[in-house]
Structures are given as C-alpha cells and as structure tokens.
Image (cartoon, helix red, strand yellow):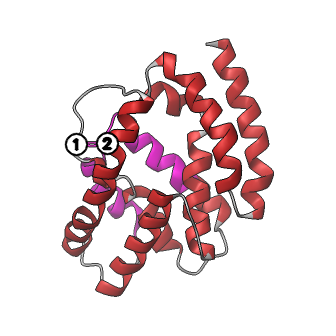
Amino acid sequence: MFNEENIIKAIEPHIKRCRPGDWEHAKRVVKWIKELGSEKENMPLLITTGYIHDIGWRDLINKEKITFEELLVLEPKANKNSEPNIRELLRQLDYIESDIEIILKLVSAADEHKSSAEDEAIIVDADQLSKLDINHLKEKFQKPEWIKMYELWSDKFKKRITTERARQIYPNLLLKLKAEINRE
C-alpha cells in the first residue's frame, strides 16, 4: 500500500543533498502531477517520480545558487547519476524491479524534456510548470539569471508542454512569473 508520508520521509533527506531548492521544487512537481494526472491508476509511481526525479544532483554541487551556464555543464552529470541513485534508494524502499523501471523511464522523460506516453507527458509537464514560480528562481538561480531563465522558459517550454491541461495553465503561470520578476 502506497504511503506518501513514508515516501517523503525516505526521499527528502536525499533530495535536500541536491541543489538548493530541489526539495521545494519536487513538492511543486508533485502538486502538478496530482492536478494533471488525478485520474491515473499509477499515481503512486508518478508521485514517487515527482519526489525523486532530481536525485542525480545529490552531492554534485556545493554552492548556493548557480548560473544558467553552470546548469548546462552540470545537468548531463546529474542525469547520468539519476539511475544508480534511484535504483539504490528504491530498492532500499522495497520497490519491485518493474516499478523501478517505470520510474526510471519517467525520470528519463523529465531529464530529456520529451514524452512519448501519457505518464511521461504528465511528468514532463509537471516539471516544467513547477519552474514557472518566482520561488523556483529565488531558490535556484542568481538574480541576474532570472530574465534569462524566463526567456528560455517562455520560448522552449511551449514546445515541451503536451497535456491539454498544462497547455491551459502554462500561459497564465508565465504571465504571473513575468509580473513577479518585474516586481523584484
């Protein structure tokens, strides 16, 4: 039986060893997963994926906030770290191998920002929507990088979003984010 509180207790310490803000980001991703995938039978796997998807960043960086250029350099390393970290942790949590494989496939979709199945689309879209939040910028990036990130998200995210519900939500989140950046 899936117990989200137990998953949170097990995963949170690992994600807090990732980049600053990754745990808060993971919680926002799960919020969007629940909204975009509310009718899905495999919601426990989607939720677990939301919490664990950035575990590849664990112990990879030791500075508070990064630049976009640093993100581009480090992201491939983090993505490569994901599979062994996920396997190790989920085995400790007694996940069966078939569920681990599903979660790895979902994390890979999030890492590549591409989906070929509905569950992958939910993960990719939840990950993208969660970034359209001023707190995401404040937690992860140096202030001079905020406009650069906004411009990237306003351009590339449109092409990444595939679920109908996320397409409806995306423009309003983007407008709100722009207004919040301007206020800061």
Vertical side of 129 occupied by 84: above or below = below
Vertical side of 1 occupied by 151: above or below = above
Q: Which residue is mark 2?
A: 74
* Label at residue 121: none
Q: Position of residue 125 (x, y in %)?
A: 62, 57
| Residue displayed at 71% across by 49% down | 158
| Residue displayed at 44% across by 31% down | 68
Callout 1 amino acid: Leu
- Nearest the eye: 35 or 152: 152
Check disc 1: other Cα within 10 Å, few if <14, some if 14-19, many if 20+.
some
Q: Is residue 12 visible?
A: no
Q: Position of residue 86 (x, y in %)?
A: 28, 65
Callout 2 amino acid: Leu
**What is the span of residues highlighted in magenta in the rendered image?**
3-31
| Element type where label 1 sits in the image | loop
Q: Which residue is mark 1?
A: 60
Vertical side of 122 occupied by 75: above or below = above
